Amino acid sequence: MIDQTLLPREFKVIECRTLSALKEAILKMRVRGAPALAVAGAFGVVLACKEIAASSQSQEALKKAVAELANLRPTAVNLSYGVQRAFSAALRGGTAEEMFEEALKEAKKMLAEDLEVNKKIGENGAKLLKDGDVVLTHCNAGRLACVGWGTALGIIRTAVLKEGKRIHVFACETRPLNQGSRLTAWELLKDGIPVTLIADSASAKLMRDGVVDCVLVGADRVVKDGFFNKIGTYMHAVIAKEHSIPFYVAAPLSSFDLRRSEKDVKVEERGKEELIFVGREQIAPLNVDVRNPAFDFTPLRFVSAFVTEKGVFRPEDLENLEKSIQNGSQNGSISV
């Protein structure tokens, strides 16, 4: 995987050969982004199966290792989805070696699926963007957050690289870990897509000035009354609503958890050092109290549409989407 903590200063591919190494990479956000976490979680099960087989430990030890892996990032549903899917595949094996092979087969399948899903999201979402649009985005929902292509940025990538539309992006820096400035800006520049970096707090002025045509973000978990995404998303949604600017959410079906609501989801709180330091530079007193929620919740009333691999859905059509997920059909998709 790409070590995302080093970008944009250094591009480095790292290998996680043990479960503990992968868990460290997830916690330190060397790998991040909901779809990427799903696939990383699946390969974590593969590593767990390999280690259990090598040490002749019991299946109970495997269950414990898998449960710990699934709960490393509690807000994003994709990690637990990927872990559960690979673990269910592993249970088809009769021996430790067979469990490893079954988990590996499923993880490789998920690897290929993610790229296919992202490209379908891109095709569906690109229809919402007009030639000449200015799009504001928050955090990073590009190929770095996935196996490849991206969700929100995948839509922009499809519109520009596949359809030839002229799109300009305002990328919010996304404090405190600056995924917008470090990752989104880096990705878009690599693709030759015009991007302007802004402070998170500048979005209100730009929307009020009428220079933003739509807001496009990803999602870490979509529930029946709204969605969770990187902290700061909610304020952009409120401002967009105030100024009648469309607010679109791009997410694969693996991010939808429509049996749950906001109150059922734990919001991850991260360490105080992320706010006290920028890199190695101290910018706040060491003894200051800190609240550092990694995500916030945006109610459905602020969302114009959800873009998925099955199509584009208005919030009021989520019930149809849930039925579509359950029966595996394309029914319920609508045009916005």
Image (cartoon, rainbow, N blue to C red):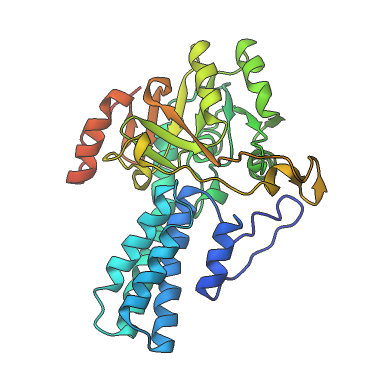
Q: Is residue 192 above or below residue 89?
A: above
Residue 105 visible (yes or no)? yes
Image position of 167 with respect to 151: above or below: above
- Most foreground residue, 246 or 299: 299
Residue 162 visible here? no
**Image point 36% across, 75% down: which residue?**
62
- In this view of the protein, which residue sits in the foreground, 44 or 251? 44
Q: Relative to 321, does residue 150 appear above or below in the rendering? A: below
Question: At 65% across and 45% down in the image, what residue appears?
Answer: 183
Q: Depth check: 129 or 303 in front?
A: 303
Name the residue located 36 percent from the left edge and 36 percent from the top edge: 263
Q: Position of residue 53 (x, y in %)?
A: 39, 85
Rendered image quadrant of residue 308? top left
Report x, y in % for residue 23.
Answer: 53, 65
Label total for image: 0
Q: Residue furthest left?
A: 327
Q: Along the horizontal axis of the image, is 114 left or right of 245?
A: left
Decide if residue 270 is on the left or right side of residue 77. right
Q: Quadrant of the C terminus?
A: top left
Residue 200 horizontal/vertical position (percent):
66, 28
Where residue 57 appears, x then y in whole percent?
37, 85
> Where is the N terminus found, in terms of image quarters?
bottom right
Quarter location, residue 192:
top right
Q: Is residue 280 above or below residue 121?
A: below
Asked if residue 287 lies left or right of residue 89, the reply is right
